[in-house]
Every structure is written in C-alpha cells, then in structure tokens.
Amino acid sequence: MRVLKENHKGFSTILALALIPLSGFATDIYLPSLPAMANDLHVSAAAVQLSLVLFMFSVGVSQFFIGSILDSFGRYKIGLVSLALFSVTSFVIAVVPNIYVIYAMRIIQGITIALIVVGKRAYFVDLFKDEKLKSYISLFSIIWACAPIMAPFLGGYLQSSFGWRSNFYFLGGLSLVFLVLELIYSGESLKHYHPFRLKSIAETYKGMLKTPDFTLGLLIIGICFGIVVVFSLSSPFIIERVLGHSAITTGYTSLLSGLSLMTGGIIAKALIKKPLGKKVGIAFGIQILLVLLMIFTSSWLTNIYTLIGFIIGIHIAGGFIFNIIYGYCLTRFSKNAGVASGLTGGVMYMISSIFSYGFANLFKVKSQLLLGVADLSLLVIVTILFVIFNKYRLQNSLGNVVKE
C-alpha cells in the first residue's frame, strides 16, 4: 500500500478539496442541456430528469455501504479505480446516446462518485484534528458549492457551442486529469484499519441512525438540498421553454444560484460561534418569507429577473442552513469517520433525490408560482423537523455537560 508522503501532503490536500465538488459537476454541468437532450433522444422532460435523479439516488444508496468499506480497506486504491470508471462511463454516455444506456452509466457513476467523495471527506478526519479539522469541514459545503456555480455556467456554453454530448466528454477528460494527479501526488491516509465484520458494521449503522439529532439532521440537509434540486430540475424548462431564453441564460442563473449557496456557506463559517438554534431558525424564517413573496407576486410579476432574484435569497439562506447542519452531522461520530461521512452524504442524496423529483413532478413545476408552491411545501416539512432536531440537540449537549 502506498502511504501518503509528508512532502506531498499539501498538494494532496488541495486535490482532496478539489475532488469534493466532482459530484456537483457530474450533477450540474448538463442542466442547461436537459431540454436539448429530451429533444435529441425523443423522450419527455421527466425522462431526462430521471437520469439526474438516478445518479443522485445511486450516490446516496452507495454511501450506506461505502463508509465501512473505506474504513476497512483504505481510501487510495479504491479512489483511483473509481476515477477511472467515472471517466470511462462519461465517454460511453457521449458516444452511445440512448436513454437506457445513460441511466445505466449514471447509476455506475453514482457509485464511483460516492467512493471518491466519501473517501476524500474521511481523508481530512484521518489527517487533521480539533480546530483545524473543524475549519476544513466548514469549507466543505463552500467548496462543494463551486460546482453549482461553475458547472452549469460552463455547461451552458458547451451546449450552445458543441451540443449536450460535450458535457460528458468534458467530465471524462477532467476525471482523467485528476486520476493522473492522484497517481503522482496522493497516497493512503488511513492509519487505523477497522476489520470488515458485517455484524459490527450493522451495529454501528444502527447506533448512528437511532441517534435522533443525527438522523433528523440528515433529513434536514437532504430536504434543504432538495429545494435547490427542484430549481435545478425545473429551471431549464422554465427559462428556455416558458420564458424563451437560451441554454447560456440557464447557465448564468445556475451560476447565481451556486454563488448564493456559497455565500450562505461563507456567512455560516463567519458566524460559526453563534448559537445554532437561533441562527438556523432565523434563516428558515427568511426562506419562508421569500417563498411567500415569490408566490404572491407571481400573478403580476414574473420574468427572469424576479425569478432569479427570489432564488438568490432563498438559496443564500439554504446554503447557510446546510453548512451548519452538515458540519454538525459530519462531526457527530468522529471515531467512525468513514461511516459517518457515508451516512451523511448518502442519506442527503437519497432524501434530496426523492423529495426533489417527487415534488417537481407532483406540482408539475413550470412557472414561478408552482416553483414557490413546491418550495413552500418542502420548507414547512423541514422547519418542523428542525424544531424537533433542536430539542434533541440541546438534550445531547446537556447530557455531555453532565458527563463532564
């Protein structure tokens, strides 16, 4: 096993941070191409949206098992194989434009992305401690938000210039570059291997999922991300088919949405020492107010500017909430970092894929009004969950104080 060299640690850490948004790139780069894909493949909007949802669900389900595999067999070699597979499947999608082949490749890509991202999140827990670890973890959602900023923006131009297949050629080439850099500069970060015993692993999962504040936190970040995905799924059709703009415009709106998520994460990092319950409660209140305004003004004020204006505010608040609760879940079980990382990412993707696809199609989101109604429905659910989460979180904090 190739151990990470001390003189490569700095660049390897940069690579680990750079690979965390790869899941977002795989999700978001072809968002502006969804209408063109539907036309070219002669399928419905829901059919091409399903390729995105299958990828997300595959990422989520995989992470239930991947954390324990990474804790038992290490991160490095598994990561290399995953990058190679991701590259190959990207080229297959571009070369074989069949919706069922795309579904199969996207499922495989979901598994490989889960292996890569969970391994890289655990990398930081392997190598860093205390305040430095908290600092890196607070960067995760900020860096992860780079993908929604850059990927659709780039994808819009690729779609406009070369067509939807160019998105997947780009993903294949990008992952190949990362593979070469990993081979040169990275190595194994895991120092203490856990025996791969299914019974003990099942007990670990069971113990984590029976912890109320952890499980409720997973549901909260899943639905928060689901609100963003509802916009991602519906915005290309609203912007390109209803409002009559180009794929490039879709890319710009997604860029602003991603910048909003990052801004929320940066604000959360700046307010990291403020009381969790109060700051998250205020953020939920702001989201609900903005969604209500979006609904009530939709009958007389609907255009690209009002749509993105409301989305910016909603997603800044969402990025703020996500950053805080995500960090809480990742650090809840530091002794089983791989499993905790896998569960956190896995449940988030599963919940967000189910709720986003379900609510986007339940409300047939094709306008600002229907987008607002879908968002409001999700916000009511997640706000109730947060109230319960905060109660259990405070009980856990009080219990820890008593033990000390």
Image (spheres, rainbow, N blue to C red):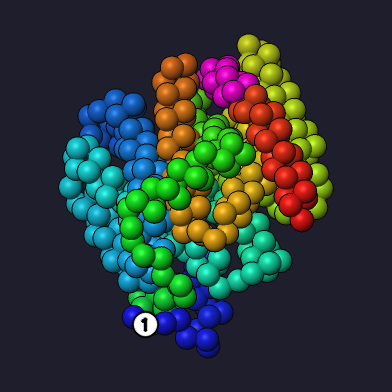
Q: Residue at x 36, y 65 (%)?
A: 195
Asked if residue 204 shows in the view, the reply is yes
- Farthest-out residue, front: 403
**Residue 136, percent from left and from top:** 63, 64
Dot 1 crowding, Cα within 10 Å, few <14, some 14–19, many 20+: few
**Residue 2, percent from left and from top:** 37, 82
Quick check: is 368 in the magenta stretch? yes
State which region is magenta: 367-381
- Farthest-out residue, bottom: 7
Q: Nearer the viewer, residue 69 or 275?
A: 69
Q: Nearer the viewer, residue 97 or 127?
A: 127
Does 128 sit left or right of 53 as displayed?
right
- Say which quadrant the N terminus sits in: bottom left
Three-letter code, disc 1: Arg
Does 276 sit left or right of 241 as displayed?
right
Above/below status of 94 relative to 3: above
Disc 1, SS: loop
Quick check: is 18 in the magenta stretch? no
Q: Residue at x 41, y 21 (%)?
A: 361
Q: Residue at x 19, y 43 (%)?
A: 101
**Residue 9, percent from left and from top:** 53, 80
Identify residue for label 1.
2
Q: Residue at x 47, y 28 (%)?
A: 355
Does 92 sit left or right of 316 as displayed?
left
Quarter residue 219 falls in: top right
Above/below status of 183 relative to 367: below
